[in-house]
Image (tube, grey):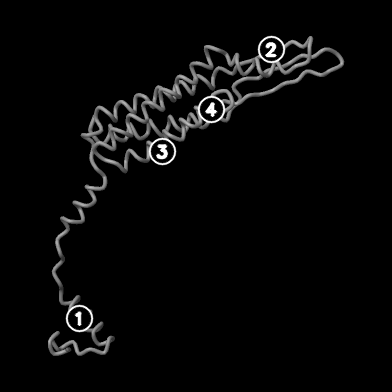
């Protein structure tokens, strides 16, 4: 894989990971239902990913910022961005995995504990969203580690354009350019046949 393709893969990986994290953070991960004694109706509460795992949307924002910064920085800055992205991906994946393993027990307990005496509760975990958060975290870790290991070989976008501007040779003045300069001099009220010393 060429350096440019590696860099593009890392940028896309971070952007996709960040987008997945932000998307899953706004979805309903856990639905808790408290069945209360008659005649009280049951109470249902839905908890989103950002409520169960606040680090998921925060990690998504960090990954999106890292995707943009990866193109802008060079050298040691690029390595730092890769490290930050890998850490954010690890936190993101851990948040999804913890929710899958624990099933949102702590959050569910707080909801169910708020019921009246004699009430019973059930919880339903939508496992697809924590799994997507875990996938987003793994993707970000891979992109971050790729940046740390290979980022120093990737092209610097800023230098490329600076070199292109510096390498552009000065264009020779044509007869048409000289004629345009003469007309501009006449517009300014100057005599184009006079030299700079004569104009003074």
- Element under disc 1: helix
Q: Residues within 10 Å of mark 1 (few under 14, many from 20)?
A: few
Position above or below: 88 against 127: below
Spatial CA span between label 2 and label 1: 87 Å
Q: Position of residue 53 (x, y in %)?
A: 54, 24
Q: Residues within 10 Å of mark 3 (few under 14, many from 20)?
A: some
Q: Nearer the viewer, mark 3 or mark 4?
A: 4
Q: Nearer the viewer, residue 185 or 58?
A: 58
In this figure, which residue is indicated by the disc labeled 4? 54
- Element under disc 2: strand
Residue 32 lies in quadrant:
top right
Q: Position of residue 26 (x, y in %)?
A: 57, 30
Which is more N-terminal, label 2 or label 4? 4
Spatial CA span between label 4 and label 1: 68 Å
Q: Nearer the viewer, mark 4 or mark 1?
A: 4
Spatial CA span between label 4 and label 2: 23 Å
């Amino acid at each position: 894989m060429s350096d440019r393709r590696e860099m593009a893969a890392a940028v896309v990986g971070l952007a996709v990971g960040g987008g997945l994290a932000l998307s899953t953070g706004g979805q309903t991960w856990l639905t808790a239902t408290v069945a209360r004694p008659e005649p009280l109706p049951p109470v249902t509460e839905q908890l989103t990913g950002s409520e169960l795992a606040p680090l998921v949307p925060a990690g998504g924002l960090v990954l999106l910022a890292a995707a943009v910064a990866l193109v802008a920085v060079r050298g040691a800055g690029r390595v730092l961005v890769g490290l930050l992205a890998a850490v954010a991906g690890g936190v993101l994946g851990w948040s999804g995995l913890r929710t899958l393993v624990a099933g949102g027990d702590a959050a569910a307990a707080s909801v169910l504990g708020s019921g009246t005496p004699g009430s019973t509760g059930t919880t339903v975990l939508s496992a697809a969203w924590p799994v997507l958060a875990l996938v987003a975290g793994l993707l970000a870790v891979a992109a971050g580690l790729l940046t740390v290991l290979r980022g120093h070989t990737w092209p610097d976008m800023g230098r490329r354009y600076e070199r292109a501007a510096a390498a552009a040779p000065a264009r020779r003045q044509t007869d048409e350019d000289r004629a345009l300069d003469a007309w501009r001099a006449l517009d300014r009220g100057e005599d184009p046949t006079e030299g700079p010393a004569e104009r003074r």
